Amino acid sequence: MHKDSLIGTLTVAAILCIVCSIFVSTASVKLRPIQKKNKLLDLKKNILIAAGMYEEGIDIEQAFNKIDARLVDFDSGEYVEGDVTTFDQRKSAKNPATNYRIPADQDFADIKVRSKIAPVYLVKTASGELESVILPMHGLGLWSVMCGFLAIEGDLNTVKGITFYQHGETPGLGGEIDNPKWKAIWPGKKIRNEDGELALTVIKGAVVSSSPNAGYQVDGMAGATITSRGVANLVKYWLGKNGFGNYLDKLAAGGS
Ligand SMILES: Cc1cc2nc3c(=O)[nH]c(=O)nc-3n(C[C@H](O)[C@H](O)[C@H](O)COP(=O)(O)O)c2cc1C
């Protein structure tokens, strides 16, 4: 067979395709465990950021060892047995046996279903007092479901921090949800007002510092009203009765 013949060219092209596809599929299979490990590490990093425990260069695994991860049943607000390290909240939300269909009038985060159980992350002082509790939360923005964590101080009424580790909002607009400058507005904000009602929210525009509600309000992101509203709504959902409300009530009463 002459190497410049049509058959020769097609044979070389076919061999090249086979070699390349073997190379790509091997790389994909070999890299999968590394990707999974990095994804988990990123999740842990975000939990540490929300809890104010992250600094550049720290050993994430070592820092995360100080956090007590537990599984919580939304309905009872009690801890449940299970391996939190292998629990997949997203998979659980898709499984009819383990999910809960959210009534439309309660579905502020616009997610339709959620898992019946979820992980929570507790940070305690050396003497065993609750320093902070970190809750996973997600909800619809403009283009995407935004996933993050909200850390609450031991008084269960003050925001310690917030992070978003996954979203598809527009960079520079809704994508500002993971801008450290915007996230820095959150710590110190109160969750409930004097009447005990959920009041933490994101408003359109800047918070007026002299307003009596300033303590519960976070500045909206410029040009991203829909994303800002999405964040306000998901916070409202996950802190409310249909979300972690029962758990937080039990925690406040010293139950969970
Ligand atoms: C290309 C493009 C991307 C946009 N991305 C976002 C976004 O990520 N989040 C958002 O709330 N609004 C986004 N908007 C703006 C919305 O369409 C809408 O105008 C805006 O939320 C209104 O908010 P404003 O009152 O702050 O301008 C985008 C608009 C365009 C044209």
Image (cartoon, helix red, strand yellow):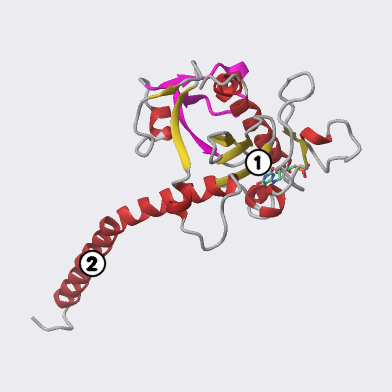
Q: Badges 1 and 2: C-beta atoms under 8 Å apart?
A: no
> Who's the residue at 31% across and 58% down the image?
31
Q: Is residue 164 left or right of residue 18?
A: right
Question: Amino acid under label 1?
Answer: Lys
Question: Amino acid under label 2?
Answer: Cys
Number of numbered discs overlaid on the protein picture? 2
Residue 246 circle label: none
Q: CA distance from mark 1 to mark 2?
A: 53 Å
Instruction: Compare residues 244 and 23 and report the one nearer the observer.
Output: 244
Residue 17 circle label: 2
- Quarter holding residue 81: top left
Q: Which residue is mark 1?
A: 160
- Quarter holding residue 83: top left
Does the segment drawn in magenta span residue 102?
yes
Above or below, 180 against 13 in this view is above
Q: Which residues are magenta?
A: 98-124
> Who's the residue at 56% across and 61% down the image?
56
Q: Split into 4 quadrants, where in the image is the N terminus?
A: bottom left
For residue 167, say whether it is visible: no
Q: Picture coordinates of residue 138 (x, y %)?
A: 55, 35
Instruction: Compare residues 187 and 33 and report the one nearer the observer.
Output: 187
